[in-house]
Image (cartoon, coloured by chain):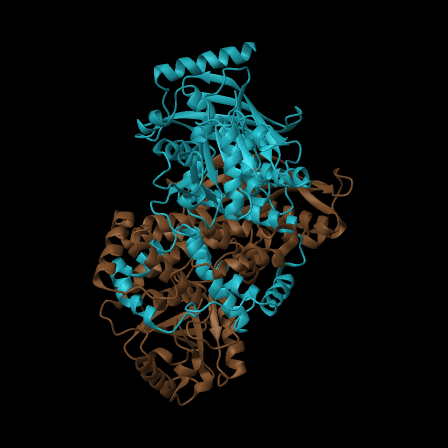
Chain colours: A brown, B cyan
Amino acid sequence: MAQRAAIIGGGVIGGGWAARFALMGWDVALYDPDPEAKRKMSEIMAGAARALPMLFEAPMPPRGTITHCATMAEAVAGAAYIQESVPERLELKHKVYQELQANCSRDAVIGSSTSGFTPTQLQEGAAHPEQIIVAHPFNPVYLLPLVELVPSLKTAPEVTEKAKETLTKIGMYPLHVRAEIDAHIADRLLEAVWREALWLVKDGIATTQEIDDAIRYGFGLRWAQMGLFETYRIAGGEAGMRHFMAQFGPALKWPWTKLMDVPEFDDALVDLITEQSDAQSGALDVRALERLRDDNLVAILRALKGREAAAGKLLIEQDTRLRAPLAGSVPLVTVRRTVPVDWADVNGHMNEGRYGQVFSDASEEVMTHVGADRAYIDAGHSYFTAETNIKYLAETLVGEEFIVETRVALGQGKKLRLLHEMKRPSGEVLATCDQFLLHVSLTTRSSCPPLPDVLARVEALAKAHADG
Amino acid sequence: MAQRAAIIGGGVIGGGWAARFALMGWDVALYDPDPEAKRKMSEIMAGAARALPMLFEAPMPPRGTITHCATMAEAVAGAAYIQESVPERLELKHKVYQELQANCSRDAVIGSSTSGFTPTQLQEGAAHPEQIIVAHPFNPVYLLPLVELVPSLKTAPEVTEKAKETLTKIGMYPLHVRAEIDAHIADRLLEAVWREALWLVKDGIATTQEIDDAIRYGFGLRWAQMGLFETYRIAGGEAGMRHFMAQFGPALKWPWTKLMDVPEFDDALVDLITEQSDAQSGALDVRALERLRDDNLVAILRALKGREAAAGKLLIEQDTRLRAPLAGSVPLVTVRRTVPVDWADVNGHMNEGRYGQVFSDASEEVMTHVGADRAYIDAGHSYFTAETNIKYLAETLVGEEFIVETRVALGQGKKLRLLHEMKRPSGEVLATCDQFLLHVSLTTRSSCPPLPDVLARVEALAKAHADG
């Protein structure tokens, strides 16, 4: 049975949490008294359901339900994990915890999306402070892996552990923040940049567009993969971090930033930034911008995944958690996935070359299924593709779900012939592939029969598929 | 004849400039009195030559030479563009400009890589202040497009224009900074983050690793594509930027950051950060880290290129500048490029599916060559691939250069058959592809003969290739 999460507050952040939990197979009970809550949730879910599955090669779990509840009591009944994302007013949060704790299980984790308050502040006056922990996510919650997890001294260690486990399961990276400070870690950095950026705009040095360009054409690209310190370590060259600091540390003494002071947040500044932002991005509404953002994030995350680097590594770990062994059906269902944005041109058609990749992935699943897995390859044996014949029967669009059904047409000695059909869930065939593989020794680089166990399984499959 | 650039100072930044200019076809004269300059330059060039060509689908121009010069006078002779990247000491920079201007052309641009000084400061005491402009790049200079271009009131407008033109030609994005301030735009933001990060480490809130994780798993991913303001505009939801500011503007008044004060940059802090950085990244030397960084940057930049978004758009523009019409050779040389990191697994082998893409790109070049170009497609006609037969003959490695030679084997009515050979520069054949295309009407979605002009060219090619 699916586990249950309760989401309290269904705005941009709460809705993002609900979408991530549901797409990762949890049943979600949502409480938000906003009369628009249903519409907002369905819009957020549409974006999340499009983007999140694109991050993974493994099949997604069966999607959980999202139930809109009339009361908090109803929402938290049976919930193993509760996430609060109500507005940033401490007295409001205290009231919410009172009601939650009067109704929820003592074993449930209560995470808070607060970006500013410490867990100790949140726990003030709570009947069960040990259940409460800060779990501060980043927008869009359904795509970005980071969640700052901040326990107080009163938070029970098992709550922290359970929160880590749950958040990891739904594909996030819980960063355990070991000290309580206002705004945790990331928002302190963001706040520093935000202040400086406001000064630059207010003083007429740069527009919002120019500041964004300075970030996305420059250090933003560095930070997406390495962050600040590792980037600077490299800038120190052969002499490393100490050299970098010797060179650039003194710059701290220069009168560079205006951060000693806070700009007056008056109407004039708000107007100025709003006007510049309209000029920069006003041609698109927020849904269109969100979609651009999500598609770009998917593409960047998948680029890092291909490199097994930074946030991409987290996706690979999530794939491992999501992946199950192939069922022994006839034919084998070797692939079940969604077409990600990086497989398509901007018109949304899956690129020709990706069909080859799909069928190659399908073959790899067959190999794993017959025991020619990673360990087998590491031991020096593998199948190599010798020839591929693909027929393109219908156009495949970005965001489409599809499966590949595979039959072993020949499995004899070193020869393996696979017939793949790539299909829509409706059964419509999108493409077929006739693939001929040869078993090789990775040491001699020439062909040879597989080891007996693998050969036996290949032969059994060929027989079953000929009969089936 | 190749244009000449003079690079004064061959450290990480100057060497990066030299590599970018040379890879973009300029002859480079380098002056650096460091006895290690040649070794350092060749190491930087090795990294740049590996990474930069991966960003482009178009063939790179013939590589320019890099000459190490014994004097500044020798280096600047005949240079149309001069870039100064000597250490950040104003009196040293003034001395360099004196020597440069005693020897260089009055038409040359003199750009400075300074991250802190204003152009007015740089121009003090110069014989020809109008030649001098700040052109502040970001490490690695050969990959990141951003260059902050800051003229003073004394900088000649034609110098600013020429600098923009040159920097654009070598694939950079010159961001015209309209006001002179210390540290321009990007480094003010970086400085703000750096200070705050130092506090977090000094106060024991977070380690360098934790801070880097908070960035690369969170807002770093957002900033790589949209920057700060557009990201926040979206966070404002349907109500936009004004709403975001109403919600989060007041946070400025909170006692969040410690930026009103500067941490004491003493030995204890330097030791602490060095130790943490060693623990985080010390397993790899700087060359290995640089390579990881570069490969990740290539992958992210190419992901954005696939999306035609952010810095990826700049790459597409550079492709357009680099691309020339196909020569009418027999066979046609339809592709000339490098295998980028995102086409390979982490073991460095080009993925099977990318062969399909290579041959599809080759076909597209043939289509353009016969007049079935973007305008033809927009008018409702195109060739669709009906069948592809690929033979994989040798393994192709990431970073390898290769070409595709294409023959038109059949060009008759709606039928087009192409035979592609993918080859190493040595002539070794990596893969072949027999591709059958049908001409279609994009309105009826069914096959039909091409328009007469296109058909005539296809028939002529088929005849020439049968004879050739």
On the question of residue A106 being in view, the answer is: no
Total number of numbered labels? 0
The vertical placement of B404 against A271, above or below, is: above
The one nearer the camera, B406 or A179, is A179
The vertical placement of B466 against A18, above or below, is: above
Q: Image quarter for residue B175?
A: top left
Q: Residue at x 43, y 34 (%)?
A: B128
Q: Position of residue A242 (x, y in %)?
A: 62, 59
Q: Furthest-right residue in view?
A: A444
Horizontal side, residue B114 vs residue A458: left or right: left
On the question of residue A173 being in view, the answer is: yes
The one nearer the camera, B190 or A149, is B190
Q: Position of residue B48 (x, y in %)?
A: 58, 39
The one nearer the camera, B362 or A202, is A202
Q: Image quarter for residue A144?
A: bottom left
The vertical placement of B154 against A241, above or below, is: above
Q: Position of residue A195 (x, y in %)?
A: 36, 62
Horizontal side, residue A419 vs residue A455: left or right: left
Q: Position of residue B321 (x, y in %)?
A: 43, 29
Q: Residue at x 41, y 40 (%)?
A: B174
